[in-house]
Image: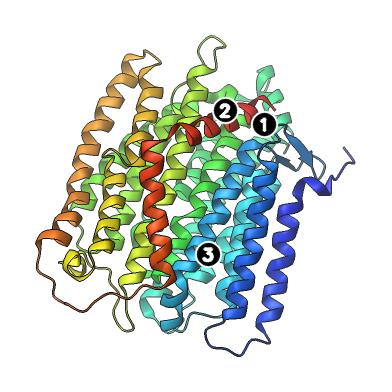
């Protein structure tokens, strides 16, 4: 128990050190474009991503900081993808932020500290370390949303996010404290052993579980804890919206796995019922509300609620008579789904930033009118992202939805088969508003015929769209990696 094992947390230590270095270096940068800070941040994140990639093949679960954290295959995969997501977000945001007086050292340091919080959440093996990571991420994101202090909409979004985020943290903390009271331990492994004995207070355990699920639902942004999502997505500067909509979803998935699966799998019959209800409600409300939206960012917010509801369906297949195959398939498909959702989200918000200009936020659906005539390449890229979110082949979104549905259907449960049918029908409803975007881009007349600039963001958009297509045509590599990561993590 005295072993700290510093080597296991090398990526997090490097990230912390470089975040402090970036903050110091930026004090001496006078260039308004912040080129030095920008390049140093990207180099630091690339180094952190390299460390996670190098450790990905090591399938063993390694405990560190007196079992406060655990580094395993799932942790390295999620941390790697979160790091790449933050790098992509900063590349997309560079020009956009520069035009809005947001390109300051704070943008880079807060992004790195948010990523550090995400990494700690992903590797947390103790209630305290998970909660500390959550708070570090949340506080950094509140500040990022409020980075445009002179913008009333952004400060209002930051206040809503802060108040509701604090409420969510309170829910989660209350649930964790009740779990501690019921099991007598903060360590996830010990909590698992305590629930296995069956000698703990069932009422306290049930109340704690309800509060934990509510806190997790807030962080994922699923119904009925979704009220902050549309307002924050719409009100925040698009650069901050992308930082909220991307990598933090991976952290929310990670703590859902850590808390509910690794710590509380013996109460699965209780929390799976709750997640089932949350998933169906999220898909219903998210898809129906998105139809009525005229603001693109708000539409994507409701779309995200529906997408994460679909992802939660992967947590519903249960362990039957000691056979973990159906549950493992479900968790693996959910991991694949959330990774591909973040990949597509990066591209959609990145494209909104590319289309924006000084004094003009390209965030209304009507702003995309006739985009094919202004820039056929960008219209094609946006169409790929919309097809992926709708789940149309050959994009990765189709395979992600198929993987989750397969995990449900192969359980041979009548209830899960019925839920699968509901999920497919609601996805058809969702296809309407995604295809409406394509119709607006290709068949409506442009209000503004000026060509679209792009720069480095245009190159990244192309790579992003190609990744969505490539993973849709050849999904087996990533799917195998997700299944292997989940299996190794749960075995450890």
Q: Nearer the viewer, residue 53 or 203?
A: 53
Q: Is residue 170 left or right of residue 44?
A: left
Q: Residue at x 62, y 69 (%)?
A: 41
Q: Residue at x 47, y 19 (%)?
A: 326
Please give the label number shown on residue 324. Answer: none
**Whole-percent x and y of residue 268?**
52, 24
Quarter of the image that includes the N terminus: top right
Quarter of the image that includes the C terminus: top right
Q: Is residue 77 left or right of residue 185?
A: left
Q: How many marks?
A: 3
Q: Residue at x 30, y 57 (%)?
A: 381
Which residue in the protein does label 1 denote?
182
Q: Quadrant of residue 245 in the image? A: bottom left
Q: Is residue 123 left or right of residue 95?
A: right
**Whole-percent x and y of residue 163?**
48, 63
Residue 71 appears in the figure: yes
Q: Nearer the viewer, residue 271 or 45?
A: 45
Please give the label number shown on residue 203. Answer: 2
Q: Residue furthest right?
A: 2
Please give the label number shown on residue 141. Answer: 3
Q: Is residue 266 above or below residue 43?
A: above
Q: Secondary structure at mark 2?
A: helix
**Whole-percent x and y of residue 491?**
66, 24
- Disc 2 crowd rating (10 Å Cα; few below 14, some 14-19, many 20+) is few
Q: Quadrant of residue 106 in the image? A: bottom right
Give the Cα separation between the discs numbered 1 and 2.
Answer: 9 Å
Q: Residue at x 46, y 84 (%)?
A: 101
Q: Is residue 467 left or right of residue 250?
A: left
């Amino acid at each position: 128990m005295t072993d700290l094992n510093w080597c296991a947390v090398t990526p997090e230590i490097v990230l912390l050190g470089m975040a402090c270095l970036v903050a110091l270096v930026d004090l001496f940068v006078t260039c308004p474009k912040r080129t030095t800070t920008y390049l140093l941040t990207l180099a630091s994140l690339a180094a952190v991503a390299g460390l996670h990639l190098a450790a990905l093949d090591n399938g063993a679960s390694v405990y560190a900081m007196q079992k406060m954290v655990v580094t395993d295959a799932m942790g390295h995969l999620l941390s790697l993808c979160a790091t790449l997501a933050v790098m992509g977000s900063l590349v997309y945001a560079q020009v956009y932020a520069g035009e809005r007086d947001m390109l300051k050292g704070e943008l880079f340091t807060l992004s790195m500290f948010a990523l550090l919080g995400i990494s700690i959440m992903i590797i947390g093996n103790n209630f305290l370390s998970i909660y500390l990571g959550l708070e570090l991420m949340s506080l950094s994101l509140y500040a990022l949303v409020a980075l445009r202090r002179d913008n009333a909409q952004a400060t209002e979004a930051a206040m809503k996010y802060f108040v509701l985020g604090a409420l969510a943290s309170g829910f989660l903390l209350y649930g964790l404290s009740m779990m501690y009271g019921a099991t007598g331990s903060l360590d996830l492994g010990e909590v698992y052993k305590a629930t296995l004995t069956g000698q703990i207070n069932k009422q306290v355990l049930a109340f704690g579980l309800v509060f934990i699920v509510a806190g997790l639902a807030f962080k994922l942004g699923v119904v009925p804890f979704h009220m902050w999502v549309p307002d924050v997505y719409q009100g925040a500067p698009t650069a901050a919206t992308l930082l909220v909509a991307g990598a933090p979803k991976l952290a929310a998935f990670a703590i859902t796995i850590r808390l509910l699966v690794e710590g509380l799998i013996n109460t699965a019959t209780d929390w799976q019922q709750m997640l089932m209800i949350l998933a169906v409600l999220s898909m219903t409300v998210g898809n129906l509300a998105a139809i009525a939206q005229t603001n693109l960012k708000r539409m994507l917010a409701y779309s995200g609620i529906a997408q994460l509801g679909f992802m939660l369906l992967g947590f519903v297949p249960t362990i039957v008579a000691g056979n973990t195959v159906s549950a493992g398939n479900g968790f693996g498909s959910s991991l694949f789904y959330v990774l591909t959702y973040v990949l597509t989200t990066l591209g959609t918000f990145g494209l909104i930033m590319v289309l924006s200009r000084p004094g003009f936020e390209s965030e209304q659906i009507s702003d995309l009118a006739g985009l094919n005539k202004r820039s056929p390449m960008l219209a094609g890229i946006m169409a790929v992202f919309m097809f992926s979110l709708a789940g149309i082949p050959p994009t990765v979104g189709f395979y992600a939805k198929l993987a989750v549905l397969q995990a449900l259907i192969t359980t041979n449960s009548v209830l899960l088969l019925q839920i699968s049918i509901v999920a497919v029908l609601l996805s058809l409803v969702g296809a309407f508003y995604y295809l409406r975007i394509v119709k607006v881009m290709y068949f409506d007349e442009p209000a503004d015929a000026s060509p679209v600039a792009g720069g480095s963001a245009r190159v990244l958009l192309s790579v992003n769209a190609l990744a969505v297509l490539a993973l849709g045509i050849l999904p087996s590599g990533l799917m195998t990696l997700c299944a292997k990561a989940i299996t190794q993590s749960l075995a450890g």
